[in-house]
Image: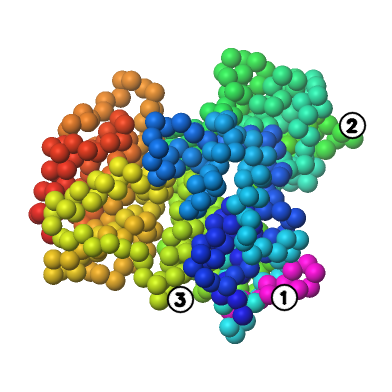
Amino acid sequence: MLDYLVIGAGPAGLQMGRSLGAAGRSYTIMEAGPAPGTFFATYPRHRTLISINKKYNGTDDPELNLRMDWNSLLSDDPELLFTRYSDRYFPSAEDMVRYLADYADGLEIVYGSRAETVTRTSEGFAVTDGHGVTREARRLIVATGVSRENVPNIPGIEHAEQYGEVSVDPADFIDRRVLIIGKGNSAFETADNLVATAAVVHVAGPHSVKMAWRTHYVGHLRAVNNNFLDTYQLKSQNALLDGDIRNIERRDDGTYRVTVAFVRADEVTKDIPYDRVIVCAGFRFDTSVFDDTCRPDLHFSGRFPELTPAYESVNVPGMYFAGTITQSRDFKHGTSGFIHGFRYGARALHRILEERHHDSPWPAREIGADPKAMAQAVLDRVNRSSALWQQFGVIADVIALDGRGGARYLEERPIDLPIETGSHVTITLEYGPDHDQVDPFDVTVGRIRQSDAEKADEGHYLHPVVRHHGPDGQVAVHHVTENLENEWTSPDVHLEPLRAFFARRI
C-alpha cells in the first residue's frame, strides 16, 4: 500500500510529489489529462497569465527573487525556475505548460487516470479511475484545483455560454450587444477582448468591483485586465451593472431578454436585450468523485473544502488538500489561490505530514533566548523570507521557548497550527488594519514616518508583526515599523525596539 495518493498533476500536485519523493515516501499522482498542468492548456482563455514574472530585481539572492517570481515551484534545481521560460512580465499560459512538463520529469505520475470514485477503506483511501483501476493509500492529498466553472443559480442560465467554451475570436462579436455575468478577472479578460468589435458590452454582478491593488487580494481585478473600466468611465457604450440577474430568456430569434435588478440605480428592475450572454463567474471545487464515506465538508458557499490548520478536511481524517483549493484559509485576503502562495502551503503540508506520520520533527535551529539574538534572528528572516512575504498573515515563523534559556527557531508554519510549547513567539508580515479602506493613490491620506517606531502599529503597508504568546495564554504584540523598500535593518528604528520588547516579555 502506498503512503500517499495525490489527485491532480497541476502545480500543487507536482510540488507535493517532489517533496514526497525527496523524503523517500511512496506515492502516486493520478492525472486525468495526458500531461501535467492540463488546466493551463485551456485557461486563462485569452492565454495571458496574471501571475507576474519579474526576472530582474537587483539581487542574485534566490530567496528574494522568489518574492517577485509568482510562477516557480519550489525546487533545489536552479534550472527549474519559471523565469528561465519567459521574459514577459505577464507570461503566456503556454510557457506555464512547458514549465510544468519539465518540473514533472521523474515524478511518479499516471496520466489518463481520471479519479472517478474516492472511498474510505479500513486502512486509508481507495481511488478508482475511469479505466476501473483502483489504487490505495494510507493518506490522500487532493490537488485538483477548482476544476468546475461556477454557474450562478439564475433561471435561464442554461441558455448562456460558458467562459471555458465561448469563442475568443473578437470577430465573432462584431456589432453585437454582449452581457458578461461576473466581475472577476475572467469576466474582465473577456470584456477587454471585445471592446474593439462588440457594439455594447455590459459586465454585471451584485457587488462592486474590487481592485487587487487596493485589497491586496490577487484574485480581485488586476490592472492588466481593467482596460474595460476606461471605456466605461469615458462613455464608450460599455457599462458595469451593479445588480442581480433575475432571469435570462432566450427568444425565438436567438437573442436574449435579461432581467436585471439594480442595486444603486433608480430602476428597481429592467429588461435589457442582448445578442450574447457569457457566464464568467469563476470556479469551484468538484466534490462529485467522493462517496458518502469521505465527502469533505465545504466552505464559502460550497466553493472550497473546509480545512483544519493542517490542511486536513475537518470531517475526513487523513484527507489533505494542496493548492488553490486551500483558499478557505485566506479567501479574498491572501494568496493561496496562486502558485506564489500555495507553494509555501504545500511545503508546510509536507512538513506536517512528516511530523505527524513519519516521526520527522519540523526543521528548527537553536538560537537561544537572548533578546538581542532573538531580535536579530527575526529581522534576518523578514528581510529575506519569500514565504512570509507571499503568505502574509497566513504563514508564520515561530520561536519556541523552553523556559530554561533555550529557544528554537521554526520556519514557515501555518499561523494557527498548534504548537506544544506553552510560551512561543510568532513572526508574520501583515498589512495594517483596514488597509483596504485606504486608497493607496490618495496622496492626502496621512502615513506614519518610517522612523516612528512608536506608531508602527498604525502603518497600513506590509510590515513585520511579532506576537509573544505567554504560558498563561496572553498575547503581547510588537509591530516593526513599515519601510518603503522593505529593509528592516536600522539598529535604532528596527532592532532596538524589538530587542526591548523581547527583554520585557522573555
| N-term-proximal mark, 3 vs 2 | 2
Percent of width and height locating residue 257: 78, 33
Identify the amino acid type marked 1: Thr
Is residue 323 shown left or right of residue 372? right
The residue where tag 1 is placed is: 134
Instruction: Using the rendered view, name the quadrant where residue 463 is placed.
Output: top left
The residue where tag 3 is placed is: 357
Is residue 480 shown left or right of residue 71? left
Which stretch is magenta? 124-135
Q: Residue at x 55, y 42 (%)?
A: 82
Percent of width and height locating residue 155: 74, 46
Residue 488 magenta: no
Identify the amino acid type marked 3: His
Q: How many residues crowd around disc 1 within 10 Å: few (fewer than 14), some, or many (20 or more)?
A: some
Q: Which mark is residue 358?
A: none
Which quarter of the image is occupied by the N terminus?
Answer: bottom right
Q: Which mark is residue 253?
A: 2
Above or below — where is 200 with respect to 244?
A: above
| N-term-proximal mark, 2 vs 1 | 1
Towards the viewer: 109 or 113:
109
Q: Residue at x 43, y 39 (%)?
A: 65
Q: Are marks 2 and 1 in contact (CB under 8 Å)?
A: no
Q: Secondary structure at mark 3?
A: helix
Percent of width and height locating residue 201: 69, 25
Above or below — where is 20 with respect to 155?
A: below
